[in-house]
Amino acid sequence: MKKIIPSLPKGTRDYSPNEMKKREYLFEVFKYNFNLYGFNCIETPSMENSEVLNGKYGEEGDRLIYRILNSGDFLKNIDNKKNISSNNLKSQISKKGLRYDLTVPFARYVSMNRDKITMPFKRYQIQPVWRADRPQKGRFREFYQCDVDYIGTKSIVCESEIISLVYSIFNKLKFDDFEIKLNNRKILLGISEELNFKNKFEKFCILIDKIDKIGVSGLKKEMKLNKFPTSSIKKLISLIELKGNNSSKINYVKTFLSNSKIGLEGISEIENLMKIKSDFTLDFTLARGLSYYTSTIFEVVPTNNNIGSLCGGGRYDDLTEIFGYKNISGIGISFGIERIIEILNTNNLFPKKIESNNNVLISYLSNDLIKNSLELANKLREKGIQTDLYSEKAKLKKQLQYANNNNIPFVIIIGEDEIKNGKYMLKNMKNGNQNLLTINEIINKMSSIK
């Protein structure tokens, strides 16, 4: 038999027990805060029908969808095999794809369950997504998203609540080195109108979304390559380089977009938000590459790290319409757990407590004591004390090493004398202290420190 060298697909990862403890801790922080703000949990399948996914993410996003081949002989019924294009071939051999994000499946869910849910509907979802992207630091082909969304309301209260939720979560994580950037797609549309490239609006959003990576000079170059008017590029750069506080930026853009009805509508929406919530930074270069956004958009970025956005989202007004559910506005934000984990690791912000998942290991000195050890383990577990039991016969030194390797802080050592006397040796693995205690004394001690 040919030996296989173990490997992983690029852009995917295994997670060790210690890494999973950190991830589970984060999930609990998210869930706690999502529930605190009144969101309810749902889940959707890993795969969706291609017609659900296609055309929702813009040209670049659609290219990154992972296609699933039809089962069986998927080439059997292909028409015109010699002249078929790759795009036509994809549509004939693949009818499903892995979900690219959680928002489009959510829109499909709402449309299918409109008679079972009450509007406005608030949901959260924590599941993996897949993108056929180029792997790099902080960017993977398989990763988790943690989403919250409102749907069925256009109230500006939603924007305010989402911003508050972001602060609530990062406050719980003890990370405050970030800023919330906010823009409005209507303002971007107004800019494209004023600068005479409305017919290239989607391309404009894709290019300006890359400005953090390619810089102003790179944006100029890309826009010239895509045949944007030279005079328009110059005016756009003056807007991009705009400095000042939110109010001064608003005043400047009002003048800039004085002839654009849609642009002024976007400014008005931001002004209405600022009446109830103002702890964000206006950034007119913020575009969010996904084409389904129609109004407010926001991103959360660390201020002293170039890892990219930690979370982002926005308002979408037409996403359910393609599923036959019209005039339903939604807004949401997605937290990127991989980048948040990286930023917490970099800043040493994970609690020490999550490094150990067991409070005590039971170590027995003879196989004759296995039954006693199992009985003791069950008594501890009944009291909510996390208990591990060494499963093989081994010298005490090896069992203690097992405890150290797994960050187990206490070991109960059971020998014949301990069984006779009803007292067990409790060893503190951090300082080496040992005490003979009854089972009730051990329970009280462990319960007080867990």
Image: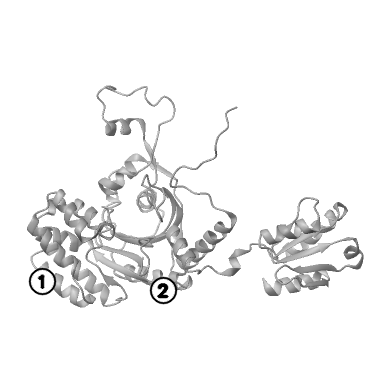
Which mark is drawn over residue 255? 1
Three-letter code for the amino acid on which mark 2 is drawn: Asp
Q: Left or right: 250 with respect to 144?
A: left
Up/down of 220 relative to 12, above or below: below
Up/down of 432 relative to 106, above or below: below
Up/down of 60 relative to 404, above or below: above
Which numbered disc, 2 or 1, marks the residue that appears first in the sequence?
A: 2
**Secondary-structure class at tag 1:** helix
Q: Dot 2, crowdedness within 10 Å: few (<14), some or many (≥20)?
A: few
Spatial separation of the CA atoms under disc 2 and disc 1: 34 Å
Q: Left or right: 270 with respect to 360?
A: left
Q: Name the foreground residue: 222 vs 311.
A: 222
**Number of callouts in the render?**
2
In the rendered image, the quadrant that contains the C terminus is: bottom right
The answer to whether any part of residue 149 appears in the image is: no
In the rendered image, the quadrant that contains the N terminus is: top right
| Mark 2 or mark 1, whichever is nearer to me | 2
Q: Left or right: 24 with respect to 228?
A: right
Q: Name the foreground residue: 439 vs 39.
A: 439
Three-letter code for the amino acid on which mark 1 is drawn: Thr
Which mark is drawn over residue 176? 2
Q: Measuring 25% from the left and 45% from the top, which residue is drawn there?
A: 59
**Secondary-structure class at tag 2:** loop
Residue 153: give x, y in percent of width and height. 31, 63
Q: Left or right: 247 with respect to 177?
A: left
Residue 231: give x, y in percent of width and height. 7, 59
Q: Dot 1, crowdedness within 10 Å: few (<14), some or many (≥20)?
A: few
Residue 270: give x, y in percent of width and height. 23, 70
Q: Quadrant of residue 66?
A: top left
